[in-house]
Amino acid sequence: MKKTTKTISNKTRSRVTAYLHAWLFGEEDIYEDVFNREERPLVKARRAMDDPHLDQFNPRDAFEMRAFQRAYNIAGIVVCVVMIVAMLVTVSWLPRMGAYYNPNNNEVSERYIEKGMEETGAVNIVAGMILDYRAFDTFGESCVLFSAVCCVFILLKNASSGAAAAAEEDDRIYEPKNDVILQRIATVLVPFIMLFGIYIMFNGHLSAGGGFAGGAVLGAGMILYLLAFGFEKTSRFLNEKVVNAIVCTSLTFYCLAKSYSFYTGANGLHSIISKGTPGDLISAGLILPLNIAVGFVVACTMYSFYAVFRKGGM
Amino acid sequence: MDFIRNFPFFGIMLTMLAAIISLPMRGRAAKTISLTVFAIETLLAASVLIYTVHTGESFVYIMGHVGAPWGNELRAGVFEGLMAYFFSVVMLLSVSGGLKHLRLDIEESKRNFYFVMTDLLMGALLALIYTNDIFTAYVFIEISTIAACGILMIREIGRTTLAALRYMVFSLLGSGLFLIGIVLMYDLTGHLLMENMRLSVELLVLSGQFRIPLTVAISLMTLGMAIKSGLFPFHFWVPDTYGYSTPASGSILSGLVSKGYILILIKIYCRVIGWENLVQIGVTDILFVFGLAGMIVGSISAIHQNDIRRMVAFSSAAQIGYIYMGIGLGTQAGLAAACFHVLCHAVTKPLLFISASGLADASGGSKLFRDLQGSAYRNRWAGIAFTAGAFSMVGMPMFSGFISKLLFATAAVQVSVARMLPTLIVLAISTVLNAVYFLRTVIRIYTPAEQEIQGSMRIKWTQQRSYILVLLVFIALNLILGLFSQYIADAIQLGLSMFS
């Protein structure tokens, strides 16, 4: 009995001090010891001193947490349904697709279609649009790929080569090494895939295709080769340094070449880049080299994504 | 054409080129390139600012040999020059102030990636500031989203990976909504260039056609950018993102990246939709309510923290609330106050993050208040800098925060009573709350420590000369914004008047 009164009076007193304490020190962060690996032992020891029952209680099992989780799921569904309905209603109010009075049938698309070939030298109007009229946007898009590669490297790259080898070994436990069927088929297919990728890249200004599509095909060919023959073979001609050099050179070329063209265009200077005869392989000014640069960036991005996801390096 | 008109384009291309060539380099070389480029960019932006103030009008720069609306276009006026100048200064100072922690927090082999990411961020922010084309804005928003995640997760402790994941989900949701908004706008106007979109929007509003899709498009773009800049109730990614990243990243993310999104939103409001149409549709009312709520909720959450970095991070959520409240007032004066607060927060928050890291260094690396007691005596310059930043955020006269609060209050007095009263009341409450948590921290770091904390040590000024220099420049910027606010406010007014 005596003990209870003492606890109560302690409690009221401690509430006042707890507010003061909270004002001065702030409250505990409940995730602190769950996620923060660095501070874990220290924080845990401190908490254990404050509350000996801590270990038996998982905050996720608390009633409030479960109720919150349920409410969260319901709210998520409601928000999604509302968004879907809102978007469907909006779409029903939009101008009719393909109608002649649409706002986007204006002087912009008219000039792209009618004067595109004359002004850019590219038979493929899309290539003319993305690599000539709006080349700055496409430069941005290539840099998106570049920043994605860098982020994947930051996240997954192994510090030591030993860890990379271990990851590679671990990955191949359930897969046969040097599978004969795969190797034979790859021997036949890979050259054609690569050739096709290069064809798409080089013909971007003449027919459907271009750097993004061609680069994707080229990258797929390289990944198939890697799957069949393993890192020992591919790393003879493609390691991290080479990939970095290719990406770096391609983007630097894109940046400098296009800067020249922007500079001359904006300042009304004469540009030495000639458009050539539309339809020739070597024509359309910068579009062909830019397609090749973009293609290399895309191929290297795909290949390094695969390699880094698989063993944390190349 | 004057040569200075090339400078916006030079700035963007130079930072992007620096990012690209830093990829195969070592950390040290990449660092030198980064800092050099930021310094050059500061000069370029200053020239643009002076040039546009001198000529008194904005100019457009064609990216290529075919003009807009077919090609891309940049546009620079006083507003753009001012923002680019402050952003590049803050970027330069944030990175150089956080260099010591970059060495500690980032693995040797990945250090060059950090500078690749900061260069990309700088380029993306410049492009967001200068672009005159809404799709270019989207492309560079993508770059800044990815690069922001990069500089966050490069400090590889569990908590930052988790924070990066959450930040990425929120950020991508925001980008996605913004993209849908752009697509709808293109479908309705047939243009991506801001001026031409503006003309089409005016026609649509006059004829009353496509009212619903137009409203939805504007709301989606607003929602997307509100999520990405951390407006209440989308501020849940804020504390971990700003609180656990390396100090330089925390400064860049809170000081610049979230502001970049707000600036592009302001640009869209003024140059694409038109201020009157925006007020008529009612977007400003919604922003006003959530801005007010954010001011209170962010501050209350900040009071509850026991960790100095998380407290400063929550205070960012409150400051974003101020900015949106200013936009939500629906007047030019409110918008100008919001723009001033963007600058004020961009120079104050990095100061707080970087000085807090100095205080933590003197307390055995702990960021908890109980360990920080007396840390201002152990690292005097960091203590002074933190106090200056705290005074600015609370709104002490002479510092920039005072002026922005004054501008908000002045703008509020000019609007209807229904908006004036809530604004003034919440402004007052929020100031008191700011004082509660910032002055508590100041008192605490100046209270002598009762017991020795493990690993705490006294840091002398000779050990951290460049760090102190960065802090002093930050304080000076704060004082300049506070003492010469009339010039800055005039420049913002001038820049905003060039928008229409």
Image: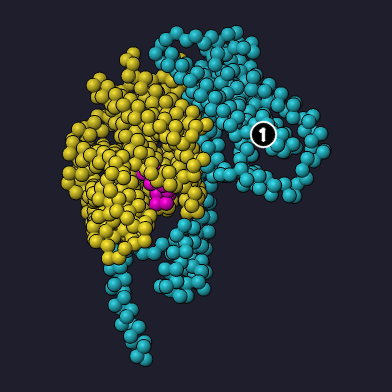
| Label 1: which secondary element | loop
Q: At x 32% / y 80%, what residue is drawn? A: A10
Chain shown cyan: that is: A
Image mark 1: chain: A
Q: At x 41% / y 11%, what residue is drawn? A: A268
Q: Which SS does the magenta portion mostly show?
A: helix
Q: At x 36% / y 87%, what residue is drawn? A: A4
Give whichever of A219, B26 is nearer the camera: B26
Q: Quadrant of residue B6?
A: top left
**Three-letter amino acid code of the residue under disc 1:** Ser
Left or right of residue B322: residue B252: right
Q: At x 45% / y 33%, what residue is drawn? A: B30
* In the image, residue B10 above or below residue B254: above
Q: Which residue is mark 1?
A: A235
* In the image, residue B181 above or below residue B21: below
Q: Which residues are magenta?
A: B241-251
Chain shown yellow: that is: B
